[in-house]
Image (cartoon, grey):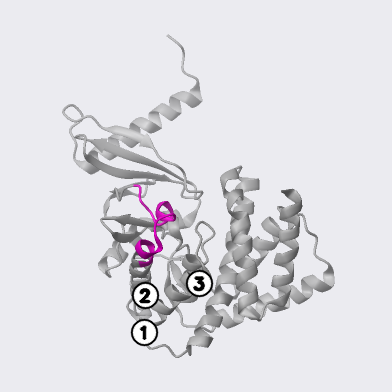
Amino acid sequence: MTPLFPGMRRLMEMREDIVVFAREALGLSEKSVSLELSPLEGRGSDRTFFRLRWNREDSAILVQYDPKRVENAYYADIAAFLREIGVPAPRLIRHDPAGCLIVMEDLGDTDLWSLRETLWETRQVLYQKTLTIAYRLHSFPKRDFPSARVKLMESFGPHLYLWERDYFRDHFVRDFSEIKLGPSFERELESELAALAERLAGTARCLVHRDLQSRNVMIRDGEPFFIDFQGMRFGSPFYDLGSLLCDPYVHFSVKEQEELLSFYYGLSNWDYSWTAFRNVFWEASAQRLMQALGAFGFLGLKRGLKAFLEHIPAGLRHLQLASLQAGSLPRLRELSVECQRVLERKG
């Protein structure tokens, strides 16, 4: 018999602990029901996902998370809260905070991303439903939020907006594009982006998903469900709109983007004119895309998750479009064009 190395033994013990927790959560007898545990693709957030199967047709999802990433520990309580306010999210079955384990409803494998090649008429309806749910989240009264029992990450404000643009400059501009900004240009860019952050901070303040893109919207029986909302916080609704409608993972024509943005605009009586609303959308999209490109660079280069690098060309095209449409971000537009030249040289 081959002896087990200490690390291998510990891994097997951890897996046994996971199976025991899953059985208890699902109320399954160890002897009478066979439980199959299959790993799922990771999502780049210090979590491991498994699909649990039993009785041939029954299934659930088990998540093992790293508590060092604080937001992961918030997921379960946020999930329960979202369901309370009518925002579709996976049903929580059991959460073990000490063991950093969650068992929750299995929503299947279909998300908006997997439907990206379907006819626009089909996708349009699903995106309209998604935007309606997003508006439900955005319109929840801040004064009614149960902060005593549901913890959130830091709200959007000067500090977080600064972190996002530094993340972009460090991991995408410097590390991926290998561009060193001149002192004068860097000062002008920082002034421009700080002013952008100030304008976004002055927009309506509400609950936002913070990562509302196609892979975080599951589709079951034609209805959307939100997932990966552990980063939910208070911020600008335009950030979520930029995440969804300027998503580097999927393609929209400008006409399709405009149709969906107009649909969301029609859900409420805004204090903005359509022109002003549209301008803020493009500004918020630029902010979001800086964060996304920074994440692609960080995950691809520092974490070795090379698949994220494949989405850089689309993200960069979106950033060029957003900075052009906004009309208030000439330095960011100039920088995005230079990054595009670098990308083309790299092939």
Marker disc for residue 56: none
Distance from label 1 to label 3 (Cα)?
17 Å
The answer to whether residue 56 of the structure is visible from this angle is yes
Residue 120 magenta-highlighted:
yes
Q: Amino acid at mark 1?
A: Ser
Please provide percent x and percent y for residue 63: 38, 45
Distance from label 3 to label 2 (Cα)?
12 Å
| Nearer to us: label 1 or label 3 | 1
Please provide percent x and percent y for residue 132: 34, 72
Looking at the image, is mark 3 or mark 2 earlier in the sequence?
Answer: 2
Marker disc for residue 239: 3
Q: Residue at x 22, y 40 (%)?
A: 58
Q: Is residue 118 left or right of 327 when viewed as pictured? A: left
Residue at the disc numbered 1 = 268
Looking at the picture, does residue 299 appear above or below residue 245?
above
Distance from label 1 to label 2 (Cα)?
9 Å
Q: Residue at x 49, y 23 (%)?
A: 6
